[in-house]
Image: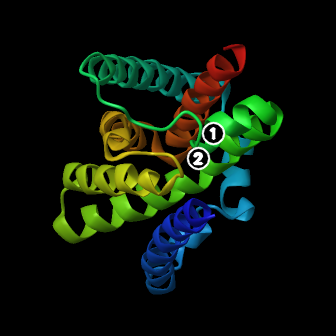
């Protein structure tokens, strides 16, 4: 029972801190909120030509492949070094993958929309604006992204290490192809991981 309360506290504290920071930034700069409103992006999607779609999907798939390779290599190196990144029994996504695979697949495709909007679309942009360095924005947003994932029940500090590489690549994808490219990459990455977990 204590473990449940500690896990709940981890999630709530991380969510509250991130929510307060992002909420303040959105209030100060309402254009961040406009980026995820359908009236902002639907007209752009409708006006995209086939060539633009092919470019966007190609970039996203290349970044997906790179992210999978980096995360896999880092995971293998850590595993061979005896570093444990998460508890198999307690990690929320492992439990959901075994009991509710379709729910997990939906979650890992909805959550990245908001994660990319927050970490790349707001935090990266805000740091880049303040420092006049998009790459510093990528670095800081990557650190926040990796640290935030430690709020997931069953994760240990080493869990953040592969996420550093993934965050850097998602940030680079954002710079190359915008928020849409980062969301597609993150969704594809998550979907592939979930399918691999489901297949066993």
Say above or below: 85 vs 149: above
| Pick the front one: 105 or 139 | 105
- Seen in the image, is 171 located left or right of residue 196? left
Residue behind mark 2: 112
Residue 141 placement (x, y as % from top left): 33, 55
Residue behind mark 1: 93
Say above or below: 27 vs 7: below
When asked about the image quadrant of residue 120, the answer is: bottom left
Q: Sequence-wise, which precedes: disc 1 or disc 2?
A: 1
Q: How many residues crowd mark 2 within 10 Å: few (<14), some (14–19), many (20+)?
A: many
- Can residue 157 be seen here? yes
- Residue located at (39% from left, 35% from top): 85
Q: How many marks?
A: 2
When asked about the image quadrant of residue 4, the answer is: bottom right
- Can residue 48 be seen here? no
Q: Tell me the SS state at disc 2.
A: helix
Q: If the image is split into quadrants, where does the C terminus sit? A: top right
- Seen in the image, is 194 located left or right of residue 74? right
């Amino acid at each position: 029972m204590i473990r449940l309360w500690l896990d709940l506290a981890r999630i709530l504290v991380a969510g509250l801190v991130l929510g307060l920071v992002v909420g303040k930034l959105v209030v100060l700069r309402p254009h961040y909120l406009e980026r995820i409103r359908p009236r902002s992006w639907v007209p752009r999607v409708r006006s995209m030509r086939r060539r633009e779609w092919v470019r966007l999907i190609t970039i996203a798939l290349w970044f997906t492949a790179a992210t999978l390779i980096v995360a896999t290599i880092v995971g293998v190196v850590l595993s061979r070094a005896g570093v444990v990144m998460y508890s198999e029994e307690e990690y929320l996504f492992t439990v959901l993958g075994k009991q509710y695979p379709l729910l997990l697949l939906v979650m890992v495709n909805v959550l990245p929309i908001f994660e990319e909007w927050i970490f790349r679309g707001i935090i990266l942009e805000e740091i880049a604006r303040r420092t006049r360095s998009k790459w510093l924005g990528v670095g800081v947003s990557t650190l926040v992204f990796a640290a935030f994932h430690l709020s997931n029940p069953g994760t240990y500090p080493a869990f953040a290490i592969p996420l550093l590489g993934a965050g850097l690549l998602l940030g680079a994808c954002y710079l190359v192809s915008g928020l849409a490219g980062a969301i597609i990459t993150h969704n594809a990455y998550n979907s592939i991981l979930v399918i691999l977990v489901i297949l066993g």
